[in-house]
Amino acid sequence: MLSKPEKDTLVQAVYEIVSRIPYGRITSYGAIAAAVGYPNLSRMVGQIMKGSGDYKEKLPCHRVVNSQGYLSGKDSFDHSGQMQQLLEAEGIIVVNNKIKNHKEICWDPMEEILFDK
């Protein structure tokens, strides 16, 4: 269990990673969890994303999917089709709630973090 300061730090780290996801790319909850140093907390990353509130409009939350490319967070948007619409507006192909070529367009935040240092 994380302490309140640890959770607050985790939330800010997750938001920072999400803010860096490039246009037309996606990443997964697990990749974000690993990048912030908590590889076993992908579900918590999902909860953070779900509770992002006001940040949701400032962050590209629609670019975060599960490890198989499914739009598992679509119910957190204003309507169930909004996540897909936002992705498709970036040229990302979605078929049956799954990114068609998710492995090819998946962005690994660990690579960016390593290059930033």
Image (tube, rainbow, N blue to C red):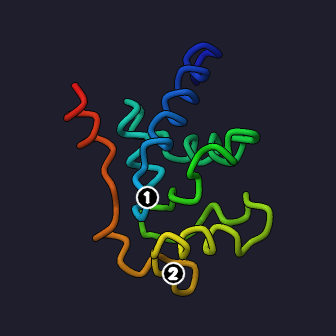
Spot occupied by residue 2 in the image (x, y as percentages of width and height): 57, 21
| C-alpha gap between disc 2 and disc 1 | 15 Å
Locate the N terminus by quadrant: top right
Q: Check disc 1 and report the residue beneath it.
A: 23
What amino acid does circle 1 point to? Tyr
The quadrant in which residue 54 appears is: top right
- Tag in front: 2 or 1: 1
In the rendered image, the vertical position of residue 24 relative to residue 32, given as above or below: below
Q: 58 and 114: which one is in front?
A: 58
In this image, 101 relative to 69: left or right? left
Characterize the local packing of mark 2: few (<14), some (14-19) or many (20 or more) Cα atoms within 10 angstroms. Answer: some
Give the residue at x 33% y 55%: 107
What residue sits 54% from the left and 76% below the top? Answer: 88
Q: Which residue is mark 2?
A: 94
Q: Amino acid at mark 2?
A: Val
* Position above or below: 94 against 39: below
